[in-house]
Image (cartoon, rainbow, N blue to C red):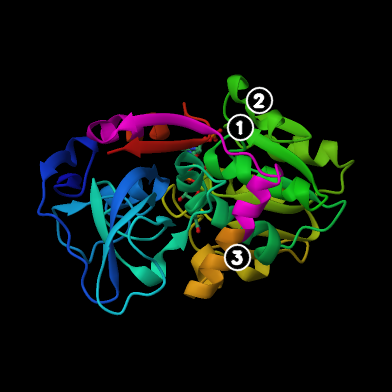
Amino acid sequence: MKAMVMNGVGGREMLELVERPEPVAGPGQAVIEIAFAGVNFMDIGVRQGAAWTETPNPKILGVEGVGRVLAVGDGVEAVAPSQRVAWVYAPGSYAERISIPASSLVPVPDAIDDRTAASVMMQGLTASHFATDFYPVQPGDVAFVHAAAGGLGLLLTQIVKLRGGHVIGRVSSQDKVAVAGEAGADHVVVDTEGRFAEEAQRLTRGEGVHVVYDGSGPKTFQGSLDALRRSGTLCWYGPVLGGPGPLDVMRLPKSIKIGYGVFFDHVHTPELLRARSARLFDWITEGKLKVRVGGEYPLAEAAKAHADMESRRTTGKLLLVP
Ligand SMILES: NC(=O)c1ccc[n+]([C@@H]2O[C@H](COP(=O)([O-])OP(=O)(O)OC[C@H]3O[C@@H](n4cnc5c(N)ncnc54)[C@H](OP(=O)(O)O)[C@@H]3O)[C@@H](O)[C@H]2O)c1
């Protein structure tokens, strides 16, 4: 089968489309014919050596996708051949086929198409974790959402709105404003220099926002603190774009709370994974959550998908088609 491997840590030139042996379904596993693989910032981080270093190179990139079960191994009862399934955090998803523990698979309802399912596993589960567990948004709360036209930002904006919150979104260019607005952002700030906090304070009449969701790297960290109200919450989540460095807790202002949000810490059992995925699928079926696919690339063009994501040109979800 064809697979996109990274031959070593580095730039996009490390990616190569190669032939790999067909995967087999060991005990507890299922082999899937992949319809779409999701592209995530995490994949860029893995390529750059920020994560998943324990697996030697060359290794197949990608952790997310949707497809149809081809075969199951001994002891698998949760899924059956020909069933449509989706997954996240399954290394080796930039490929035509993959072998995955059946416990990591989520059944995809008929009402949800493959593109949509592949687009909400990482970003949808993360967004729903942020807005319902990490900081459960209450009606009337004001949330500040960074990269509001990205795959994660668009879903997060909609879920905050679903819960009765208001959204101030930040994007890096004017051409993303309308996209963030379509997802329901009440105000959209265009900024790459960290000046967004002044705008957040102005829009909240000097009170500041209840919560900031920030995965945009070290440059936005101080502004995110400045945008918060007293006792506000900063949900920080951007490991690939870089952390804020050492923090002196005694210097943190306004009784704010800061944490590093990772959905897998809360959605850590197969039962929770299925329940949280089912809730996303329900919201989509009911028309409450819309998915925007910003780009589809042949598997062979994974490097172009990475280049587009890194250049901040993209909106919505990027998918690879094996
Ligand atoms: N902790 C977790 O559980 C978790 C899970 C999923 C994702 N993440 C993190 O969430 C962030 C978004 O990742 P994603 O895969 O979901 O993609 P995404 O939401 O589609 O993010 C792409 C957006 O990131 C912004 N961006 C791109 N390059 C940037 C740069 N060099 N500096 C600052 N912003 C940049 C761009 O928005 P603007 O140009 O408009 O700013 C772009 O729209 C990443 O930091 C990723 O590591 C964390």
Residue 259: which numbered mark, if any?
A: 3
- The residue depicted at 67 percent of the width and 50 percent of the height is 283
Q: In what quadrant of the picture does the C terminus appear? A: top left
Q: Is residue 95 above or below residue 30?
A: above
Identify the amino acid type marked 3: Gly
In this rendered view, identify the residue nearer to me: 234 or 101: 101
Farthest bottom residue in view: 75
Q: Which of marks 3 and 2 is nearer the N terminus?
A: 2
- The residue depicted at 32 percent of the width and 60 percent of the height is 81
Q: What element carries label 3?
A: strand
x, y percentage for residue 17?
Answer: 15, 39
Is residue 264 visible in the rendered structure shown here? Answer: yes
Residue 292, picture quadrant: top right
In this rendered view, identify the residue nearer to me: 195 or 292: 292
x, y percentage for residue 8?
Answer: 16, 49
Q: On the image, numbered disc 1 is attached to which residue?
A: 171
- Numbered disc in front, either 2 or 1: 2
Residue 263, picture quadrant: bottom right
Real-space CA distance between mark 2 and mark 1, rounded to the nearest whole angstrom: 7 Å
- Numbered disc in front, either 3 or 2: 2
Identify the amino acid type marked 2: Val
Q: How many labels does the image show?
A: 3
Real-space CA distance between mark 3 and mark 2, rounded to the nearest whole angstrom: 28 Å
Does ligand 1 reach within 8 Å of label 1's beta carbon? yes
Q: Give the range drawn in magenta.
A: 279-305
Q: Left of 244 or right of it: where is 4?
A: left
Q: Are marks 2 and 1 in contact (CB under 8 Å)?
A: yes
Residue 319: which numbered mark, if any?
A: none
Q: Is mark 1 on a helix, strand or loop?
A: strand
Please check the rendered image and state whether residue 296 is part of the magenta-colored stretch, yes or no.
Answer: yes
Q: Which of marks 3 and 1 is nearer the N terminus?
A: 1
Q: On the image, numbered disc 2 is attached to which residue?
A: 177
